[in-house]
């Protein structure tokens, strides 16, 4: 079983910054990609940013130029640096990782979510 533990959420004023972290542990063999998703009340979960094992990044248009995703492969950890935060960034942020476990089976795991609230 692969477990993801997120940290770094909180309350910030508009224009401020937060940094989210997500550490993967458990029966890991290889993580192919990690990413951050978010879900605001009454809305569907959406991709915020993702990064592959080789460092290829993908961002939602709404966060381009403000958010930066990075990962430390040695620590099986992914980060999301969020700058110039807006009230519309308020949501529960979820970490996701997919790859192969030590039993050579594919996994696709989610964290428990961390709340980000941006006040105007």
Image: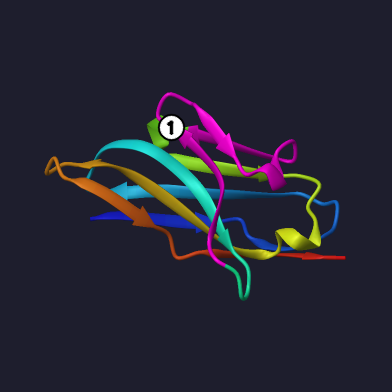
In the figure, residue 43 lies in which quadrant?
bottom right
Image coordinates of residue 62 in percent, x first then y, are 71, 47
Q: How many marks?
A: 1
Q: Residue at x 43, y 48 (%)?
A: 23
Q: In the displayed structure, does residue 84 sit left or right of residue 24?
A: right
Picture quarter with the N terminus:
bottom left
Q: Residue at x 70, y 64 (%)?
A: 90
Which range of residues does the magenta coloring cover? 44-71
In the figure, residue 75 lies in which quadrant?
top left
Q: Is residue 107 visible from the viewing direction of this image?
A: yes
Image coordinates of residue 21 in percent, x first then y, are 54, 48
Image coordinates of residue 118 in percent, x first then y, are 77, 63
Image coordinates of residue 67 in percent, x first then y, are 68, 41
Does dot 1 land on a helix, a strand or a loop?
strand
Q: Is residue 36 magenta?
A: no
Q: Is residue 76 visible from the viewing direction of this image?
A: no
Q: Residue at x 79, y 62 (%)?
A: 87
Determine the residue located farthest toward the bottom in the rendered image.
Answer: 42
Q: Is residue 69 magenta?
A: yes
Determine the residue located farthest toward the left in the rendered image.
Answer: 103
Query: Mark 1 = which residue?
Result: 52
Q: Is residue 18 above or below residue 34?
A: below
Picture quarter with the C terminus:
bottom right
């Amino acid at each position: 079983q692969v477990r993801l533990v997120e940290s770094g959420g909180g309350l910030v004023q508009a224009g401020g910054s937060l940094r989210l972290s997500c550490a993967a542990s458990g029966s890991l063999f290889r993580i192919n990609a990690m990413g951050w998703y978010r879900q605001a009340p009454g809305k569907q979960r959406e991709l915020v940013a993702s990064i592959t094992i080789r460092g290829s990044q993908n961002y939602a248009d709404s966060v381009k130029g403000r958010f930066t995703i990075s990962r430390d492969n040695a620590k099986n950890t992914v980060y999301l640096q969020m700058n110039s935060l807006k009230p519309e960034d308020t949501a529960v942020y979820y970490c996701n990782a997919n790859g192969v476990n030590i039993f050579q089976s594919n996994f696709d795991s989610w964290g428990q979510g961390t709340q980000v609230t941006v006040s105007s």
